[in-house]
Image (tube, helix red, strand yellow):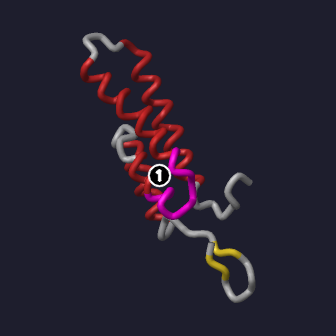
Amino acid sequence: MNESSTGTSVRPTLFNGRRHRVLWVVGVVFSAGLLAPLLFLGAARKGMVPRTVPAGYAVVIYPIALGRQWLPDPGDWISWTLAAAVLTAAVHAVLLDTGRPPGG
């Protein structure tokens, strides 16, 4: 962590502004979650989330998205599961740069 001249720690920011945050969240939703691991990989590189977070999103979202295409009759459960994962990733993305300390 960097320290400013006042002695307070400076948190890294992921988004350059409100517009940037909205674009990322919309991108995560409209890509059916396929951009979520990339967003969280950037956050992990800046030390905002553990490195297991992008890996977790990739392990959940990519097989579900591919399963919708490859399974002969995936049923409704796979669509609902993907929707839940995408909404979770979108909410998590919104909460990344709220100014709150990690875990608080």
Is residue 7 rendered to the left or right of residue 67? right
Q: Which residue is mark 1?
A: 40
Q: Residue at x 49, y 65 (%)?
A: 15
Which secondary structure lies at badge 1? helix
Disc 1 packing (10 Å; few <14; some 14–19; many ≥20): many
The structure residue drawn at horizontal position 62% and vertical position 70%, both measured from the top left corner, is: 11
Q: Which is nearer the eye, 103 or 26?
A: 103
The quadrant of the picture occupied by the N terminus is bottom right
Q: Is residue 92 above or below residue 98?
A: above
Which residues are the magenta region? 42-52
The quadrant where residue 55 appears: top left
Question: Does the magenta-highlighted stretch encompass residue 31?
Answer: no
Relative to 8, is 56 above or below?
Answer: above
- Residue 46 appears at what percent x and percent y? 51, 64
x and y percentages locating residue 59 in the rendered image = 42, 34
Amino acid type shown at disc 1: Phe
